Amino acid sequence: MMQRLTGPERQLAMTLCVIVALVGLLMAAAGHGDPFGTHGGIVLIAACAAALFVLRAMGEPEPTEDRSRSYYDDPTKVGLIIALFWAVAGMGMGVWVAAQLAWPELRFDAAWSSFGRIRPVHTSGVIFGFGGNALIATSFHVMQRTSRARLAGHVSPWFVLLGFNLFCVIAATGYLMGVTQSKEYAEPEWYADIWLVIVWVAYFILYIRTLARRNEPHIYVANWYYLAFILVVAILHIVNNLAVPASLAGAKSYSAFAGVQDAMTQWWYGHNAVAFFLTAGFLGMLYYFLPKRAGRPIYSYRLSILSFWGIVFFYIWAGSHHLHYTALPHWVQTLGMTFSVMLLVPSWASAGNALMTLNGAWHKVRDDATLRFMMVAAVFYGLSTFEGSFMAIRAVNSLSHYTDWTIGHVHAGAMGWVALITFGSIYSVVPLLWKREGMYSWKLVEWHFWLALSGTVIYVFAMWNSGVVQGLMWRTYTDSGTLAYSFTDTLVAMHPYYVARAFGGLLFLTGAILAAINVYLTIRHAPAADPAADPASAPPRDRPTSSEAAEPAVPAAE
Amino acid sequence: MDITHALTAAIAKSFGLFYLIAFSAGITAYAFWPSLGRRFDKAAKSILDDEEGPCR
């Protein structure tokens, strides 16, 4: 991998490894006896491992080909494989967490294996590990193709990808040691947060510099979504994680916010993490890979612009719907509720745009499980955004909030929309990047599709039932005005649904394992694509196509 | 100058009321600007054939 770097680039990579290793050493020495020191050790080991990779390439001959004539896909390939690793690890943790809720003896009485510690390993593992790596990898792919330009830099993509994964590892190991700043989806402590800011700024600069090299007059809409994802996540992350460390040699810090301001900042962050991490970036995937796989341009490009700005303008204000009936001023709750309801318009515009694109290609949806992944993802996107707008209404929220309905809603989005569009994108991009005729086994892709779909449906229905039953039991009064059910009564009522939820999750995990196996076999054993073969007989879009790129280049400023 | 609740509420209820509407009007005009149609169509189609490598 590192052989494709020139001498100065290898030296730069080595310098970065040494700097990070020194920081790790300093952390390990200063934080001895604290989880901070353990994390220093992890940083040191990670930097040394990266340095070994660079060292192995140090004596090798430098690349002689004209690198600007091809796309730089090595970081994308590694990113996709890491994403699949996190998918299996994060979803595996999810199944364990779900099983703990159904059978509490699976907690095994260790501190690290308690629900409060492994639950964030699951959420961060799937959101940041699986989703984040898939977003970074596909964004590298999409930004180059849509700009018809090579990545602007050969070291910075590796810095972004590996630096982000170092953050993920610090986060997950921290949770197991009990390190958390108790903000949902923003649990990692101050030093991990600072590191992520550095990585994220490098990511933003890389994206902007690649776009600046583009040979297309117009920036394709998928890039807008990816850029919104990068930029807004940076802002959210910095503001919500403002904190004062208790000591520069320890993990503990204190938030800059307190009371209801803290709650509002957290849910401004939390809901926009859903909006810009779990929606905008994946819409970028949808707007690139779905038209490409279907072989048809997006149904309405104008609508895609409108829905992009609609999503950006509205989502930012929706976070306060997480704080209905709290100390937050009533008008702020109403503001969040109103914007959440309005959000339905751009959300359904995107979902509808995706489905209308498939008009004329429905036979492909029937035959091609990869495209079917994307179609079902668009349907779940429409369903879960409708549900989200509905649940944000204060009266509905009074029933749904704090119940499993919320969990069901999140998973309709995370499994049905985010994971399915990601798997669809992975299946369409893997044969292309490794120059294979197609995936190793289309039957495994079919199996994965049906396992994922049935797992999602079982999960979501279980949580809908569980949540509504729970919510109704909590608000049922006797004739004498006391609560009819004790908390334990509700737990007993939940049990069958929790078993069903764990089973649904297990099906989904099985599908993800099949995906990882299939990708491995594709890389190792699938027949190589023959560039001389007749493109018409080739599987659709699984190979490089002849292109309009032969046309004269259009200057960047038209 | 202190940032008080009254001040932020006043900004939110005056400027805040209109700037998003102004943005939305601007974006709608951009999305439906007739002369941009060809550029949008070209962008939508161009992704279907982009594997040959960077064009030079």
Image (spheres, rainbow, N blue to C red):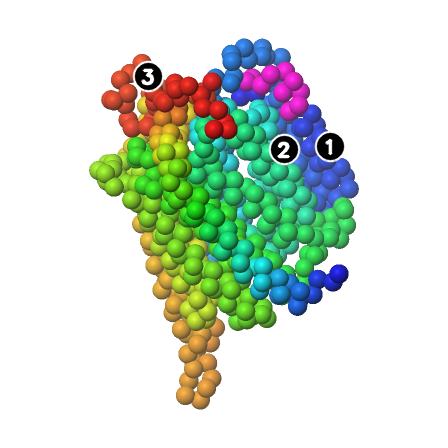
Quadrant position of residue A390: bottom left
Residue A171, position as x, y percentages in the image: 60, 45
Identify residue for label 2.
A46
Give the numbered dot on residue A530: 3
| Disc 2: host chain | A
- How far apart are the two marked residues, 3 and 1, measured between alpha carbons? 47 Å
| Disc 3: host chain | A
Q: Type of residue at label 3?
A: Asp
On whether disc 2 and disc 3 are found on a single subunit, the reply is: yes
| Disc 1: host chain | A
Give the numbered dot on residue A22: 1
* The one of A353 and A122 positioned closer to us in this rendering: A353
Vertical arrangement, residue A174 with respect to residue A491, above or below: above
Element type where label 1 sits in the image: helix
Please rate how many residues cluster around mark 2, counting C-alpha atoms within 10 Å: few if below 14, some from 14 to 19, many from 20: many
Residue A518 visible in the picture = no
**Image: magenta residue range:** A3-13
Residue A105, position as x, y percentages in the image: 49, 58
Is residue A15 found left or right of A460 in the rendered image?
A: right
Element type where label 2 sits in the image: helix
Please rate how many residues cluster around mark 1, counting C-alpha atoms within 10 Å: few if below 14, some from 14 to 19, many from 20: some
